[in-house]
Amino acid sequence: MTESTKTRPVGPFALLALGVNGIVGVGIFFIPAGLALAAPGGGSVIMFALTALALVPVALSFAALGKRFDEDGGPVVFARAAFGQWFSFVVGWVAFVSAVSSAAAVMVGLVANAGLPLSPGLPQKLAATLLVTVLALVCATGLRISAGVWTTLTVLKLIPLVLLVGAYFVWYRPWPETSWHVDWGTWKTAGLTAVFAYQGFEIVPVLAGQSRGSARSVPMATLGSLGLAAALYVCLQSACVAALPELARSGSPLVDAAAIYGGPLLATLVRAGTNVSALGIAVGMVAATPHYLSTLAKGSLGFSLADTDAKGVPQRALAVTWLLVTILIQLSDRKELFELSSVTVLAQYVVTAAALATLGLRRERGLSPAHLAMALPAAAVGLWLASGATWNEFTVAGVALLLGLALRAVSRSVDRS
């Protein structure tokens, strides 16, 4: 192990926490109801389990490549090795813009739902701006501190969820008699709903260059975060199905189930977990998103954004990320800010699978054609996700890409001059 590896700020547990934090977000507090609407009763539990299994080839693809690229960037780096600079810029830029947009949406949503005496509009936007500024300052102090914060918040948000699962097993209630029925005609709708809840493990390889023992820790954190989330989701959905006969109509399914199993105290803890979860997601986004930008700057986008300091922070990229999030907070509402999410996940899944297949066929990086066994199913899952994206999302992605390509052309022109 080299000295640089010893001093890297992100340890294996923190990297696992980053993946779990990315997956177990605010969505799981509400998705059980939507999933039950598409797949009633125990069918929703089955869908959570089947969707996790469908995503295993995707996670394996990220793990296989993350093991072999000891640098920041994840899908951006994978695409660069397989297809060249231009293609990696396309993937990385869309991922960066989506992450910035999602971060702005999370900030606004967190402030709006925190119970603060702030009226909608400018007061909430100013509070969201203050929040992202504080988080950016925290992240600027070093990736080790950021890792400690997101790890702590991940543990805190998991506590009430684990307590809810524990209460379900202690005060077990059987599922409804029709719970095993699955209407396969709605499988696609239910599956897309479940996939949304599982998104987030793809963030792990983005910090590979800052992770100690990345060849081991990146695969462990990628697969481990998906596995832990899948086990948790199946148990939580089971608890909701058993406790709530009208689960599809519940506005806060986990809180309602917690009230039945553990009374007002457990319900309060689960409700508080929503805000803790949102804060954890916000910290992870502010810490990780600049690494997309700094990776893009290496060969595709100049402006000295590639520089990373001794504490693992690309300070200029962090400043640009903070500025863009702040601007978006002022200009858009939460719904508009999530427009790129499905297209971005699609791009990262498909491109990573294609990169694994290409590098495997070339026998580069210790890969072989045998890796097609995970790359092809992973690509199929990514393409299936495309069917869940709207034309508006593709349009927004196209506009964002055109802006990025224009910015890239300007930077290259400046470099030549």
Image: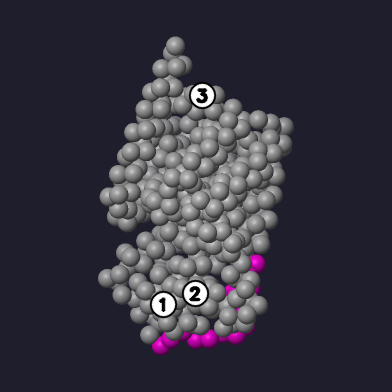
Residue ID for mark 3:
303
Please state, as top left, top right, bottom left or bottom right, where the N terminus lies in the image. Answer: top right
Q: Is residue 153 above or below residue 293?
A: below
Marks 3 and 2, how far apart at CA:
47 Å
Residue 109 seen by the camera: yes
The spot of residue 47 in percent (x, y) is 40, 69
Q: Residues within 10 Å of mark 2 (few under 14, many from 20)?
A: many
Please state, as top left, top right, bottom left or bottom right, where the C terminus lies in the image. Answer: top left
Does residue 161 appear to the left or right of 80 in the view shown?
Answer: right
Residue in the picture at 52% in, 59% down: 119
Residue in the picture at 65% in, 41% down: 137
Q: Is residue 327 above or below residue 106?
A: above
Q: Residues within 10 Å of mark 1 (few under 14, many from 20)?
A: few
Q: Are marks 3 and 2 in contact (CB under 8 Å)?
A: no
Give, as a three-letter code, the residue at label 1: Arg
Give the residues in magenta.
Answer: 159-177
The spot of residue 369 in percent (x, y) is 39, 41
Which sits in the foreground, 291 or 339? 339
Residue ID for mark 1:
249
The spot of residue 259 in percent (x, y) is 58, 80
The spot of residue 107 in percent (x, y) is 54, 52
Q: Secondary structure at mark 2?
A: helix
Mark before the other along the chain sequence, 3 or 2: 2
Does residue 153 appear to the left or right of 291 in the view shown?
Answer: right
Residue ID for mark 2:
253
Q: Secondary structure at mark 1?
A: helix
